[in-house]
Amino acid sequence: MAFAQLPVMKSILSILSVLFIAGIMACGSGPGKEENNETEAAKKNVTKRDYSITPAIAYNDLFVDSNVVEKYIADNNVSDSLARRIRSFYNARNYQLAWFSTDGMTEQARGFWNLHSYYTKYSDDSSLDDKALRTKMENYITDEDFRPSVNDKSVLNTELKLTQHFIQYVLASYEKGYVKRKEMERFVPSKKLDALYLADSLLNKKHKDDKYFEDVNESYKLLKEQLEKYYAIAKNGGWPSIAPTKKSYKKGDDEAAIQTIKKRLEITGELTIKDTSTLFNDTLEAAVKVFQSRFGYKPDGVISAALIKEMNVPAVQRVQQLLMNMERMRWMPSRPEGNMILVNIPEFVLHVFDGKKKEFDMAVVVGKEGHNTMMFRGDLNQIVFSPYWNVPSSIVKKEILPEIEKDPAYLEKQQMEVTGKDAEGLPEIRQKPGSKNSLGKVKFLFPNSFDIYFHDTPAKDLFKRDKRAYSHGCIRLSEPEKMANYLLRNESGWTPEKINAAMNSGDQKFVKLKDPIPVFITYYTAWVDEAGALNFREDIYSHDQHLAGKMFGNVKPEPLAKNEK
């Protein structure tokens, strides 16, 4: 997957200039012409309240009175310039919450919080390091039963604090011009829009200074280029729907449906020549393999029912998918000069980077439906060789105890042991290191509120499958020994031989890394890879489905201003 480029940071000179100008303005002896001019200019930089946003078309379903925002500004002594931006932000939303809805935190809240925690960890700016906010957010994120309400003062305070931090982050992280005020206000969608209208507005907006957000976010830019192609396809009627007459098609078949398949692949470019025949020939087989690779299937050249289902997804829906993933890429963090690990859940792949250079990719198994691996970030700081597996209480209750009832010798057969009881009287069970251990021979820890980590697995056959959502939530690695060798490559004494011996010793051993490595768990169902190919993946956790219901509708407002401020 492509990463965002480092945001263009403000220079020290620019900051000093702003402070100098602010100092001069503050030294005025009283209200005069200059102050009145500044006030009028300030008013122009506040978005007018959008009363057209009603609960029926709003992105979120929670609204707050403007007096609540004013009270927050007064109680927290927010500066005038920042207060104007906060008012402008909520005016653009008609005072609809940005970070919370009645079903919990929004996807954008999770995205920004990942970015926020990364920024406070790896930048020199400590102004956004807020312990109280961090505690609140961790509690909200991990509480599956959390249902926000506008009557909850804690929720409202957190909402407004997040907005303040979001604005401060953007102002501190991007050189002036690359994130326009109005564009910043759209980082969190405010209302359901027609997908083709939204695509058109993004593709055709023009700025006088010729500075655009995609200039500082490579992943976003690459998807925007693909959006232009798919928008044109959708505007021209999309592609034909394929009506299969058999379960699968392979080279040598001669069927009427093959002609339609060729037309379909010609429109999106996998088939590079015009071919109206009904014969499944070498050219079509090559095109099918390209399509399969782009959609995460083994490129065997056989057209299965699953592949036809992918081909039959309407062009407008693919436009929506591109728009949703562009929204997610707004929260792509800047990358440190050293290592970074990224796992894209729908892709079932882990990527290791060193700066801009990709070191390697690795197949992974992620959480199955009902055990959704969350989107979050952490810092990999510890390796555990020959680990015990402390079985989560939920698994003990739902899976282990029923097995013990059927077979009293179950624990012994699975090399498990009872170590005590929890507060509810449930037995605490762990599995000993060894060949049957569910964590395999090594695990990799990056502390987080979800107790998710990387680990080995004895179930190697799962990595041969195209779709790999089978775990209870943690992430299984196809090549854990390769990962251990890479992470310890600069640690004296940890030779490949010693690592292999530790993995097979049967004695649990913890090794702390000198330099923790940032880990990002992401959810992209569309992206452009290093070879420039557009990839699509299945929405395995229905996040796209949920987001589409909030983002898209039949609303077609007036065109956006061509030159936004």
Image (tube, rainbow, N blue to C red):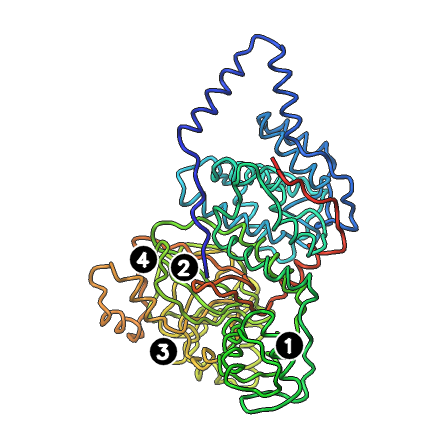
Whether residue 470 is visible, yes or no, is no
Return the x and y of residue 315 as percentages of the image width and height: 66, 66
Q: Classify residue 140 as left or right of residue 215.
A: right
Q: At x 49% / y 46%, what residue is drawn?
A: 215
Return the x and y of residue 366 as percentages of the image width and height: 50, 69
| Residue type for callout 1 | Lys
Mark in front: 2 vs 1? 1
Instruction: For the C terminus, give its image quadrant.
Output: top right
Disc 4 from disc 1: Cα separation: 47 Å
Residues under numbered marks 2 and 4 in contact, where contact means CB atoms less than 8 Å apart: no
Residue under label 2: 341
Q: Which residue is more in the foreground, 275 or 240?
A: 275
Say whether disc 1 or disc 3 marks the residue closer to the N-terminus: 1
Residues under numbered marks 1 and 3 in contact, where contact means CB atoms less than 8 Å apart: no
Disc 2 from disc 3: Cα separation: 28 Å
Residue under label 3: 434
Residue under label 4: 512
